[in-house]
């Protein structure tokens, strides 16, 4: 693939970069789970392969009951912010994290990330996610008690006040507050940033980036979603604002914002992306379906296929790794198509290796992909 070969060359010219980022605010302890289909003995079992099979198993128990064994295969850090940050740290970004990592002590799953970070502000207890993985996707079952404790006042008290937050944001190349859906006070925190921090930020000729990820807003009301979209739009005053969505989310946002997508449209995804982008009035809308990625910047639409993996080792966090690659590409000054290709290369490496790539590893991955090698 020519895009990948071009990306490898561009990344080699960017070695030794010096980037600072501030990311928050969520934090989850993720248990990666394989639901059991048949167990051969104490150590060996076959897992339920697809979400449809899992759903059928549950549906058959209606009016009766059933037992589904859940095998935890890994316990790891989770949440959009921590996984995004972990990937950026692997790339060598100087990163500060603020969010729900545990109090009074940071939870053990976050400690490796905290040790690599330039600074960490742990503001409340993390949530917990049981991530049931299948070959065609995942079902995330979350426990969010405690996340509602993370308010604007808590942020200010834990991060050096408004002046302290403004100083950190001013020094960053990219700033992001992720997982709006699961953080009950996130809109109020965004409003606090706009009202109290924005007046302290200088107006820069080349604005830094702000990145947002809603994280499946389906359960939130349309009024809440519309308010959040309005607040994200206001960040354009001080930042080049990027909103990252998956394919399901972009159609949900389009409906909420009244974007008309004709049933007869030959490319509904492009129509949805362009429609939502125009409605938001921000620098960039980036959308990542399972097999591809696309974005709109400056009124232009860009698209790339991804290095699809039929049997991934790990899918939970793939979207966050794609976001990390795209954000890195943008902060490095790559063009939109190269940024998208870095995004899908980052997630492509991640799902095959169950870990985020280093800068050297993603260059090699892009080279191999560009040369047509079997990526596994």
Image (cartoon, helix red, strand yellow):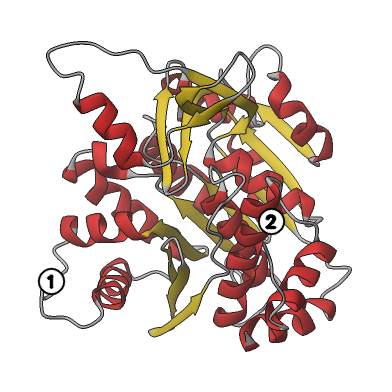
Q: Which of 163 and 81 is in front in this view?
A: 81
Q: In this view, does 32 lie above or below 273?
A: above
The quadrant holding residue 113 is top right
The N terminus lies in quadrant? bottom right
Seen as rendered, the residue at the extreme right is: 16
Q: Do the residues labelled 2 and 1 touch (CB within 8 Å)?
A: no
**Residue at the spot x=45%, y=17% of the render?**
69
Seen as rendered, the residue at the extreme front is: 40
Left or right: residue 277 versus residue 220 is right
Q: Nearer the viewer, residue 216 or 61?
A: 61
**Residue at the spot x=28%, y=13% of the render?**
66
Residue 253 position in % (x across, y down)? 25, 57
Look at the image and tell me whether residue 200 can be seen.
no
Check disc 2 and report its element: helix, strand or loop: loop
* Of callouts 2 and 1, the N-terminal one: 2
Check disc 1 and report its element: helix, strand or loop: loop
The C terminus lies in quadrant? bottom right
Q: Residue 223 carries which label?
A: none
Q: How crowded is mark 1: few (under 14 residues within 10 Å), some or many (20 or more)?
A: few
Q: Residues within 10 Å of mark 2 (few under 14, many from 20)?
A: some
The quadrant holding residue 333 is bottom right
Give the residue pinned by disc 1.
Answer: 260
Q: Nearer the viewer, residue 61 or 20?
A: 61
The quadrant holding residue 221 is top left
**Residue at the spot x=12%, y=13% of the render?**
63
**What separation in Å lies between label 2 and label 1 (alpha carbons)?**
37 Å
Left or right: residue 71 versus residue 170 is left
Q: Is residue 104 above or below residue 255?
A: above
Give the residue pinned by disc 2.
Answer: 172
Q: Is residue 315 above or below residue 36?
A: below
Q: Nearer the viewer, mark 2 or mark 1?
A: 1
């Amino acid at each position: 693939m020519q895009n990948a070969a071009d990306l490898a060359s561009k990344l080699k010219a960017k070695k030794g970069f010096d980037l600072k980022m501030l990311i928050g605010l969520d934090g989850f302890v993720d248990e990666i789970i394989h639901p059991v289909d048949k167990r051969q003995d104490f150590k060996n079992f076959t897992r339920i392969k697809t979400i449809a099979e899992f759903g059928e198993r549950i549906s058959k128990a209606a009016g009766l009951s059933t037992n589904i064994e859940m095998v935890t295969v890994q316990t790891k850090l989770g949440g959009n912010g921590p996984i995004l940050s972990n990937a950026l740290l692997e790339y060598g970004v100087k990163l500060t994290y603020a969010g729900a990592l545990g109090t009074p002590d940071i939870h053990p799953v976050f400690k490796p990330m905290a040790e690599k970070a330039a600074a960490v502000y742990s503001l409340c207890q993390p949530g917990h996610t049981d991530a049931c993985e299948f070959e065609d996707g995942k079902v995330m079952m979350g426990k969010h008690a405690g996340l509602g404790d993370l308010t604007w006042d808590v942020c200010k008290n834990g991060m050096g006040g408004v002046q302290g937050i403004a100083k950190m944001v001013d020094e960053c190349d990219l700033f992001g507050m992720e997982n709006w859906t699961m953080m009950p006070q996130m809109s109020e925190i965004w409003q606090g940033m706009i009202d109290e921090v924005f007046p302290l930020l200088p107006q820069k000729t080349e604005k830094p980036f702000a990145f947002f990820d809603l994280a499946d807003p389906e359960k939130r009301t349309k009024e809440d979603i519309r308010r959040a979209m309005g607040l994200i739009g206001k960040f354009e005053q001080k930042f080049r604002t990027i909103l990252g969505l998956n394919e399901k989310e972009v159609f949900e946002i389009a409906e909420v914002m009244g974007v008309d997508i004709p049933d007869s449209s030959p490319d509904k995804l492009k129509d949805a992306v362009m429609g939502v982008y125009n409605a938001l009035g921000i620098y960039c809308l980036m959308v990542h379906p399972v097999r591809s990625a696309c974005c709109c910047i400056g009124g232009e639409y860009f698209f790339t296929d991804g290095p699809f993996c039929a049997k991934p080792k790990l899918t939970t966090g793939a979207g966050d790794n794609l976001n990390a690659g795209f954000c890195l590409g943008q902060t490095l000054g790559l063009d939109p198509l190269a940024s998208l290709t870095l995004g899908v290369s980052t997630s492509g490496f991640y799902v095959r290796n169950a870990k985020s790539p280093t800068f050297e590893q993603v260059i090699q991955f892009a080279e191999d992909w560009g040369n047509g090698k079997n990526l596994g």
